Image (tube, rainbow, N blue to C red):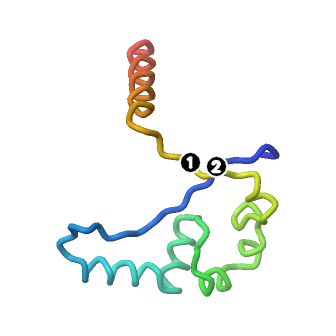
Amino acid sequence: PKEGANFWIDSLCITSNAKNVEGAEKFINFVSDKESALRIADEIGYTTPNKEARLAQPKEIQDNPNAYMTKEIMSRCELYKDFDLKTKQMYDDAWTAIKIDNN
């Protein structure tokens, strides 16, 4: 939309209490390599942060501003912000009330 939109970033991380750090690292490395990143982008239809995989995508995807947005478009977008617990509870209560009223 001309007004802007939201965007998000998926992240892979290893928790401090992970029981299999080596396995987690291997998985992250596997999904981050060019071929895996290209296949994931193709299968899911998302963009890829992997530069080599992006360059291997069809030109119509590489140049599609709806996939890889220009800086001008990105300047109108914003990240979701995480709410504090009080605000989250307010949302939960509102959705619960809506669901109850619509059943």
- Of residues 35 and 69, the one drawn nearer to the viewer in this rendering: 69
Q: Secondary structure at mark 1?
A: loop
Q: Is residue 42 above or below residue 75?
A: below
Amino acid type indicated by mark 1: Tyr
Q: Is residue 89 above or below residue 25?
A: above
- Of residues 41 and 95, the one drawn nearer to the viewer in this rendering: 95
Say the numbered circle drawn on residue 6. Answer: 2
Q: Earlier in the sequence, mark 1 or mark 2?
A: 2
Amino acid type indicated by mark 2: Asn
Q: Is residue 8 above or below residue 97?
A: below
* Marks 1,2: beta carbons within 8 A: yes
Say the numbered circle drawn on residue 38. Answer: none
- Percent coordinates x, y for residue 1 in the rendering: 77, 45
Residue assigned mark 1? 80
- Percent coordinates x, y for residue 102 in the rendering: 44, 15
Q: Give the CA distance from mark 1 to mark 2.
A: 7 Å
> Going by the image, does 2 lie left or right of 40?
right
Q: Secondary structure at mark 2?
A: strand
> Going by the image, does 16 lie left or right of 67?
left
Q: Residue at x 53, y 46 (%)?
A: 81
In the figure, residue 54 lies in which quadrant?
bottom right
Please state, as top left, top right, bottom left or bottom right, where the C terminus lies in the image: top left
In the figure, residue 75 lies in which quadrant?
bottom right
